[in-house]
Image (cartoon, rainbow, N blue to C red):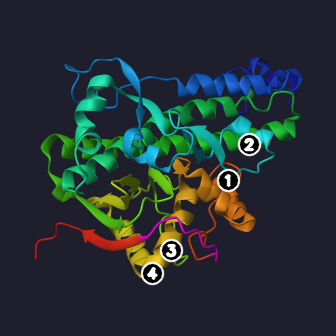
Amino acid sequence: MGSNNRNKPCWCGSGKKHKKCHLIREELNPLTRGDLEGYAKKQTSKKVCSVNNLFPDDCSRKIINAHTISKSGSLKEISEDGHVMGAKPSLSGLIKSNGKLGLEKVGIKKASTFTGFCSVHDKGIFAPIEDEAITLNDHQLFLLAYRGMCREIYHKEQNKGTAELMREADRGQNEMMQQYLQGQANSFGKGVDLALRDLRHLKSEMDSILINSDYSKIKHCVFELSEVPKILVSAMVIPEMDFHGNALQKLGLQDEAYDYIFFNCISYEDQGCFVFSWLTEHDEHCSRFIESLLDLNDDQVADAIVRFCYSFSENTWASPSWWESLVKPSQESIGDRLIQGTPLAMHPVDCLKDDHHRFNAMKISKRELRTHEKT
Ligand SMILES: [Zn+2]
Ligand SMILES: [Zn+2]
């Protein structure tokens, strides 16, 4: 880059003058592990109430550490000595472990929490799934999906900050590396912006169900479990492929409004359930996704669900003795899945197909498709 370009906007798209941006980037000190950890800490301590837009008047604005998976019932039942097994796919964690991940012990006070509800709303809105008997009624199934969604949106908002951090990751690198890393940061940032556009729409649809108690707009596929499951989860994802290895939705397309599916696994009274939920307006891809799962028998579904959870959600929590009981190749297959979907690896289109690992994580006793269609 010639010296006459010093005052032109930098090639990286930051909007700054070249001389104030990448002209001097190679001489800067690289980001340290301390920089990354300090950043991660700042991100996870952001505090907002996810329903402040709906009920501003009674919002206490005292933001608490809200559990996405019920602490008193669910997490406690699979914990041992107050701990469960989870993944920490943080940027600094990946660097520490050279991109290899396994499950680590996490105290249940920290597992699955986020600072996304105020004290009043966390208690008030979720009382039917925290304080009442679980009967899998429409209200309860909706609340599971709603809480998982709020957590995902909270984390996607944080990803905006990650995109900014990625723009600094080329400090001290040569220009070729700078261009490569800026390209990575740009495409990540664009992905985050697109996701947030979709999620704002999704949230407004879910908000209207919450306010009007109109559960005809959401469908569920419920697997009842006859024993306490070994893993618990609460998350939401864009189904990219089905359980037979067929592609469904391709990520990263500018003009696409994606279909999303929610999934939750909880335990209660020595049993449990795994629930997929989706808006009827997202039926096109979600029903194909679910049909491919319902093609399988109950034992196959149980293993398929484990593959799915570890490929698609870091908010998956496991019983320590279950994790220890897995043979090494099965543990490694889970470790490989933890990296999928990070900037380091895409999801292979066949990642949900049977990989011959038997996980014994849940016993399905009943399946039900709840669609509210008039007959
Ligand atoms: Zn620049
Ligand atoms: Zn609130």
> Considering only order in the chain, which callout, 1 or 2, is on the residue closer to the N terminus?
2
Query: Where in the figure is residue 236, as x and y percent of width and height?
Result: 43, 52
* Secondary structure found at label 4: loop
- The residues bearing labels 4 and 2 have C-alpha atoms spaced at a distance of 34 Å
Q: Residues within 10 Å of mark 2 (few under 14, many from 20)?
A: some
Q: Which residue is mark 3?
A: 243
- The residues bearing labels 4 and 1 have C-alpha atoms spaced at a distance of 26 Å
Amino acid carrying mark 4 in the image: Leu
Q: Which residue is mark 2?
A: 94
For the point 85% across and 31% down, the residue is: 1
- The segment highlighted magenta reads 355-363
Q: Is residue 357 magenta?
A: yes
Q: Which residue is mark 1?
A: 339
- The residues bearing labels 2 and 1 have C-alpha atoms spaced at a distance of 9 Å
Question: Is the Cβ of the residue at disc 3 closer than 8 Å to that at disc 4?
Answer: yes
Amino acid carrying mark 2 in the image: Leu
Query: What is the quadrant of the C terminus in the image?
Result: bottom left
Question: Which corner quadrant of the image does residue 25 belong to?
Answer: top right
* Secondary structure found at label 3: loop
> Considering only order in the chain, which callout, 4 or 3, is on the residue closer to the N terminus?
3
Q: Residues within 10 Å of mark 4 (few under 14, many from 20)?
A: some
